Image: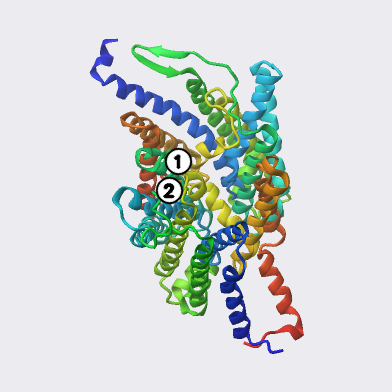
Amino acid sequence: MDFLDVFDIYLLEAVLNGILLGGVLALLALGLNLIFGVIDVTWICYAELIMIGMYGMYYLVGVYHWPYWAAAPLCILMVAALGALLHLLVIEPLLSTPPINQLLATGGVLFFLQSLATVLFGIDFRNLGIRLPLLAIGDMNFSYARLLSFIAAVLGIVAVYVFMSRTYIGTAIRAIAQDRHIMPLMGVDSRRLYIITSALGGSLAGLAACLLVLQYDVHPFVGLSFGPITFLVCVMGGLGNFIGGFIAAFLLAEIIAVGGMFSDLEWGYVLAFGFFILMMFIRPAGLMARRR
Amino acid sequence: MTNHPLLGWAVGAVVLVAVPFVYHDPYHLHILVLVLIWSFAYTSWSMMGRFGLTSLGHGGFMGVGAYVTALAWNHLGISPWLGIPLAMLAAALLALIVSYPCFRFRITGHYFALVTLALSGIVLQVIVASRDWTGGSLGFTPTAAKGNSVLALQFNSKEIWYLIALGVWASGLLVWRLIDRSMDRYALEAISEDEDAAAAAGINVTWEKLKITLISALMTALAGGIYCQYQMFISPDTVSGISVSLQMVFAAVMGGVYVALGPTVGAIITILLGEGLRIGFGTKAVGWDNLIYGALLVLFIIFLPQGILGSLLERFRSRPHAIAPR
């Protein structure tokens, strides 16, 4: 591996790990962006849906000893149903009110899900006990689980793109995202589309849960550890903008990984947050926004 | 019986001030102090919330208020009398840095909420990351002075703390009233209805929003500083972060953000609910209070967006013979 000597090996490792982390962040941001782009609602409790999904995986695989490949689809379906339920119970009664009310109501759901997990599962840290091997390339180590998440993120993004652009329902969803008032006049059942979108957003959260459970311990407050960064990614990319979210995910992940290399990981996060605020000055409407 | 409004306020004030002189149960006084401090914090949030500026960054301001005060005392030996104003300035500076671009570039509604949400995330991360000075997630205890020390703003007696908290809370209501009476209120209401129309009417939209944000941040940091001095222990999760921000939103929305005493009612209900569950069920109640809060928050936003006090007052006012003379 002579060519690697040109680079600082640790820097390269950090950069590559950043790319892998970026894949995870991109996957997290994807579902949120979908919901925002179509229904114009921000699910503050998105990370908590993932937390519930992670508990689902923990119980299916860790306690009931299902094989991982069988538990994952069930878990995705479960979180998808949760997403549809969230829309029916919380968002739908509020659709005609200011968007901020919907955001705050999902904030209530955040509290609710967190406490529900505390009450049902306790505050212990739990993990699957599956330890995927480290991937060693040269002198560098990579987490296999992260590579898997990265691949799943890319596949997920491609799948959503194909769904939205190639299928009939996807076209309808894009249409309703453009004008939610006109579509019902065209004879479209907007309620059904919203529920499908919410379920799709939920299933992406479920997918993220299946992958994150391989890397992190589950506890009721795990959502708080990656919730804020997900929102940063979405806002920086421009809420509802998939490409922007994708780029923002990798930018922030690089800053976290490379910044964290020099000191604690938390300082990497602080740097990323600082960069975010700086970007708000430069590109307030998101990375990909047209210049006015 | 006269129903002159001033008389009612005067009687209320006398009763509130008299409480610690006739009543000494430390637990109940402790609850009252907490209610007053948090009421003040919730009132600060509502200053912005009532004009449609939904900030989720107030956990950040409160964290700055508490930690700057405590750090200045422990590491630099600066008395909280100077440390709290310092902390308030720091929070205001932070508010300025984050909110100016937001207002300048018209980031409103849920964008604004998310940007400020990031702010409370940052403050939490910075506190945890600089664990060499702040103690990280384990929390932080201001160095105790001996007994009651005015210089250190540390008092053993709950009665003194009650009076301090009462004063701070009352000052919050005073600020609310001043804003309520000012032209800024009309400007901000116009802005929350329609920014473009407000700007066309000659309102300096950015400056008006910035003003109320700075007032709100200053007050929230004060609440943080007072909380730190009273509890003598702060941890990142109790004074900063998203949970604290949401807690503020929840209590304020529950009580009612459009009326002066709404946040106070919210604080009374939430704290009594939490304490009631804790006493009634002990450790079994862990999580249940937030479970109920969360469900209630959703229900309130759907069915009672004006909050308890707001809805009650509205019902009261809409009765034809109950209109109070203005």
| Neighbours of disc 2 within 10 Å: few (<14), some (14-19), many (20+) | few
As drawn, the label of residue A289 is 2
What residue do we see at 50% from left, 62% from top?
Answer: B161
Pointer 1: what residue? A244
If the image is split into quadrants, where does the N terminus of chain B sit? bottom right
**Spatial separation of the CA atoms under disc 2 and disc 1:** 8 Å
Are the residues under badges 2 and 1 in a single subunit? yes
- Chain of the residue that carries numbered disc 2 in the rendered image: A
- A235 or A193: nearer the eye? A235
Helix or strand or loop: what does disc 2 sit on? Answer: loop
- B92 or B171: nearer the eye? B171
In the rendering, at what x and y percent does residue A2 appear?
26, 10
What residue do we see at 49% from left, 47% from top?
Answer: B241
Helix or strand or loop: what does disc 1 sit on? Answer: helix
What residue do we see at 34% from left, 58% from top?
Answer: B79
Q: Mark 2 and mark 1 in contact? Answer it, CB < 8 Å.
A: yes
Q: Amino acid at mark 1?
A: Gly
Extreme-front residue of the structure:
B147
Q: Amino acid at mark 2?
A: Ala
Kindly indicate the quadrant of the structure image that contains residue A169: top right
